[in-house]
Amino acid sequence: MSGHSKWSTIKRQKGANDAKRGALFTKLAREIITAARQGGGDLEANYRLRMAVDKAKANSMPADNIKRAIEKATGSGADAEQFEEITYEGIGPASVAVIIAAMTDNRNRTASEVRSVFNKHGGTLSTVAWQFEQRGIISLPLNGRDPDELTLAAIDAGAADVGAPDGGSIIITTEPGELEAVRRSLADAGFEAESAELSMEPTTTVDVSDARTARQVLQFMERLEDLDDVQNVYANFDIPGDLMEELQAEVV
């Protein structure tokens, strides 16, 4: 598993273990509110909302919180929150390209906070989207099953690519428009995904094999992830697996 994909796994673990769960739940609620406001509160009819709710459940967000977020979005209260979706791009330490997806009620505040992180880590905001492509990413737990069995099931379901087993799961890549169809097909075959989401995957990567530099890159990623308005950060770094394992305890 490449470094940037390994970072995604670490983020999920961090989310499960982070004592400051309130900040995580706030970000998850924003995703739910935005999805419900755009497509309605029916999970079956609103694919984006169902993904947001599944992500919230995977991070142990209480059912009452999820329900309130949907009701807040679909109700007509004066306190209804309006979030604007904004994307930032730039270059960080070691010339790593990053894309930041944010949801905010104050564009100026968010831009200032993102710019501050780049400045403090020697980075700069610039166009890098050409180094990424949108893909569907499904994480499928092995649960003691033969990896080849899951791989064949994923291929039969229409997966574009299937990664090697890592950490008890396999990562399945799909075309963006096929994500839900592949997830549903796997579920019908008895293979429930632990996560399914759209992601910006790098088409080229930057090798980061020096421990000091790798630490700088991960700290930069952490600072961006910790911003209240930032929902997701995508990057094209590739840290060797053994070095990532060595640094994992520092970032989880």
Image: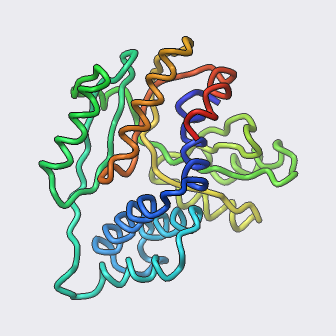
The residue that appears at 45% across and 82% down in the rendered structure is 67
Residue 53 located left or right of residue 245: left
Residue 94 located left or right of residue 195: left
Measured as percent of width and height from the top left, residue 10 is found at 59, 41
- Looking at the image, the residue that sits furthest to the left is 108
**Looking at the image, residue 209 lies above or below residue 120:** above
Of residues 97 and 136, the one drawn nearer to the viewer in this rendering? 97
Residue 190: which quarter of the image?
bottom right
**Looking at the image, residue 148 lies above or below residue 79:** above
Of residues 119 and 231, the one drawn nearer to the viewer in this rendering? 119
- Looking at the image, the residue that sits furthest to the front is 19
Residue 16: which quarter of the image?
bottom right
The residue that appears at 73% across and 37% down in the rendered structure is 166
Measured as percent of width and height from the top left, residue 119 is found at 23, 26
The residue that appears at 49% across and 61% down in the rendered structure is 21
**Looking at the image, residue 21 lies above or below residue 112:** below
The residue that appears at 42% across and 31% down in the rendered structure is 235
Of residues 94 and 183, the one drawn nearer to the viewer in this rendering? 94
- Looking at the image, the residue that sits furthest to the top is 210
